[in-house]
Image: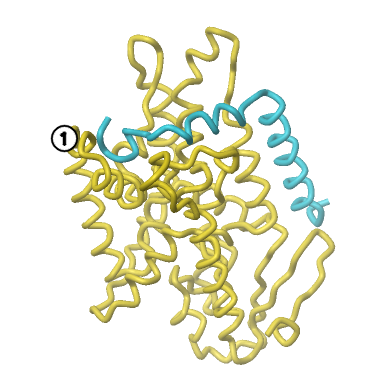
């Protein structure tokens, strides 16, 4: 069983990735990334 | 192997920062590739950045989680964690050694001819502290009157934001220059101190601070890619230790070679004169010998 732990881990994170995509997180990431983050650059 | 790694680092540096129209068009790239999380530390507010920073994106999810719960629009950052976890489960911390532009910068700085200092080992816990405190807890718990948190790591720690985004944008925009105050001065001093540290010590940011590395590091023991040490073949030449950017001393049993600090640069695999280091990849444990790979 331990032998397949890497495979199970990958499957689990693919499932998490799909869950994130289906729940609409991609546009949220995109929206944040296309505006200048003032906190990141040390202004806000 | 080392030449291949160098090429990979340069290619990903260019891919992650391929938008060179910022002086004439939008100050930052706004196209569809920004939907993708870059698998290393590369600030998404950098004028040339083409992809999202997973750390910034995840902090934003944490910072907006509480208002999201009230409006039943719950986004816990599954997309970001899934992206990082998928890469980590296959390659462990390999992106740190092969992809991350900030890792490449640290490599350049460490190559400068100045006296070298060893890394204080207790600082190895640092990335987990920054991950838990600055990336998860503070954005989630310290909120304003509307319930929104802040991106604490980006705001108070991240040197990539100051270097890749802050400095170029302040050069380009007079309004931002006027708005820069004590926070920018603090971040700038922090950046300078870190860059100086990088000249004396190998990869101090990766080993003491980086939360992305901390996440990838969790997968080093369970990833498809595994390093193996064969003590019976070892001639105790210490070539692996002398070349390791993370100072992992596995030849004498002091460290586990798949520990979370290993950035999977694979230099120990390349340099070992007696084939005492081997690679495995995948759940079907297929042994890869050095002779096949070089």
Q: Is B185 above or below relative to B109?
A: above
Q: Position of residue B128 (x, y in %)?
A: 44, 45
Q: Quadrant of residue B153?
A: top left
User: Relative to residue B78, is residue B113 drawn left or right?
Assistant: left
* Quarter of the rendering occupied by the N terminus of chain B: bottom right
User: Relative to residue B44, is residue B201 drawn left or right?
Assistant: left
Q: Which residue is mark 1?
A: B178
Q: Residue furthest front?
A: B24
Between residues B198 and B250, which one lies in front from this camera angle?
Answer: B198
Q: Position of residue B127 (x, y in %)?
A: 42, 49
Q: Secondary structure at mark 1?
A: helix
Q: Chain of mark 1?
A: B
* Chain shown in cyan: A
User: Relative to residue A8, is residue B96 drawn left or right?
Assistant: left
Q: Quadrant of residue B95?
A: bottom right
The residue at the point 26 percent across, 81 percent down is B113
* Chain shown in yellow: B
Between residues A14 and B249, which one lies in front from this camera angle?
Answer: A14
The residue at the point 44 percent across, 24 percent down is B63
The residue at the point 57 percent across, 91 percent down is B235
Between residues B97 and B34, which one lies in front from this camera angle?
Answer: B34
Q: Is B149 above or below relative to B81?
A: above
């Amino acid at each position: 069983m331990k032998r397949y732990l890497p495979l199970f881990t990958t499957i689990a994170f693919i499932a998490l990735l799909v869950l994130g995509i289906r729940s609409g997180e991609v546009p949220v990431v995109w929206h944040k990334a296309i505006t200048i983050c003032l906190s990141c650059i040390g202004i806000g | 192997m080392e030449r291949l790694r160098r090429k990979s680092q340069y290619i990903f540096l260019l891919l992650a920062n391929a938008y060179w129209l910022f002086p004439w068009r939008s100050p930052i790239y706004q196209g569809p590739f920004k939907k993708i999380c870059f698998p290393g530390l590369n600030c998404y507010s950098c004028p040339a950045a083409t992809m999202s920073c997973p750390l910034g994106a995840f902090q934003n999810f944490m910072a907006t989680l509480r208002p999201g719960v009230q409006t039943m629009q719950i986004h816990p950052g599954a997309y970001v964690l899934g992206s990082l976890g998928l890469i980590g489960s296959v390659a462990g911390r390999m992106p740190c050694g092969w992809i991350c532009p900030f890792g490449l910068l640290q490599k350049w700085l460490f190559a400068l001819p100045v006296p070298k200092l060893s890394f204080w080992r207790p600082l190895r816990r640092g990335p987990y502290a920054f991950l838990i405190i600055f990336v998860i807890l503070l954005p989630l718990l310290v909120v304003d009157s509307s319930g929104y948190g802040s991106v604490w790591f980006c705001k108070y720690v991240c040197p990539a934001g100051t270097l890749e985004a802050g400095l170029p944008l302040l050069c380009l925009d007079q309004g931002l220059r006027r708005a820069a105050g004590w926070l920018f001065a603090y971040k700038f001093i922090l950046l300078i101190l870190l860059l100086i540290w990088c000249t004396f010590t190998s990869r101090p940011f990766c080993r003491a601070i980086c939360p992305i590395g901390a996440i990838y590091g969790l997968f080093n023991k369970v990833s498809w890619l595994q390093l193996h040490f064969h003590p019976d073949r070892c001639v105790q030449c210490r070539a692996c230790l002398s070349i390791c950017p993370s100072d992992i001393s596995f030849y004498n049993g002091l460290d586990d070679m798949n520990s979370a600090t290993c950035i999977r640069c694979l230099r120990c695999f390349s340099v070992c004169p007696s084939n005492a280091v081997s690679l495995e990849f995948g759940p079907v444990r297929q042994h890869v010998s050095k002779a096949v790979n070089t």
